[in-house]
Amino acid sequence: MTSPPNLNPGSPVPLYIQLKNSLLRLIRQGDIKPHERLPSERELGEEFGISRMTVRQAIQPLIRDGFLYTQAGKGTYVGEIRFEQDRTLTGFSEEMNKLGLTPSSQVLETSIVPALADMAEKLEISPNSGVIRISRLRKANGQVIALETTHLPQMLCPNLLKYDFSRESLYAVLRQDYGLKLVSAEQTVEAALANRQELHILQLKSPAAVLRMQRTTRTDQGTVAEYVESVYRGDRYKLSTTLSVNSE
């Protein structure tokens, strides 16, 4: 294991939080690989000059959140990649880069189809108008995270399929080559069990929990730029938000 940086006893941040954050950074950067065994609490305590209790305080939240797991009589191991979606409207590649992960995509399908009534309503276009559909398998550090299918009005971004979206960021292309400013999105999330196709594509064993997401993204002109349906592995994805108290 690559050692975390030295802890700073003079910092106002408690030592256990410093250690927890350092371990989390190493996990997200891939410096500690999934299923790699961590040093014992005693070994970590001796290495950093802290008590086993302090080490335990650092490790327990990482176990609770799925970044680490224990095996009775064997020790503590690194779990599969998990990440939290923040509240910023970014593409998958940008989001993974912010977390220190290496994003990649496998394009499963690209096509142009006529908008059926339901999709026409979602994209706010006329029925039978052209819809660009891009289906991709999303990965972080080589591990499968999600299946994502994006629908875009063809009239908004003609010739979009000339780009290789296994290598290029869709949001970057929309901004830089089509001049579209994506400024807001409405997103819904629901928990579900993966169906047979999703089990196969996402490399899951039945029964497996997934998060299904639907997102409608708009430009600064209020135009719908995309409608996205995504299925995320429940064991590798965490959605968090900040709530405020209503003063009334």
Image (spheres, helix red, strand yellow):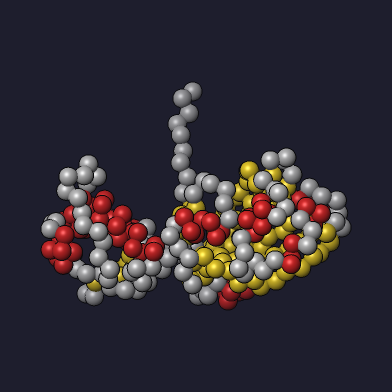
Residue positioned most to the front = 176
Foreground of the two, 103 or 231: 103
The x and y percentages for residue 212 are: 59, 58
Q: Is residue 3 left or right of residue 134?
A: left
Q: Please tell me how many numbered marks the rendered image carries.
A: 0
Foreground of the two, 194 or 154: 154
Foreground of the two, 98 or 75: 98
- In the picture, the quarter occupied by the N terminus is bottom left
Residue positioned most to the top = 248
Q: Is residue 222 left or right of residue 78?
A: right
- In the picture shown, does residue 170 fall above or below 11? below
The x and y percentages for residue 182 are: 65, 46
Foreground of the two, 92 or 149: 92
The x and y percentages for residue 165 are: 65, 66
Visible in this render: residue 57? no
Q: Is residue 22 left or right of residue 166?
A: left
**Picture quadrant where residue 130 is located:** bottom right
The x and y percentages for residue 106 are: 60, 72
Point 78% across, 47% down: residue: 124
Point 33% across, 69% down: residue: 32
Q: Is residue 142 left or right of residue 173?
A: left
Visible in this render: residue 161? yes
Point 82% across, 50% down: residue: 125
**Picture quadrant where residue 74 is located:** bottom left
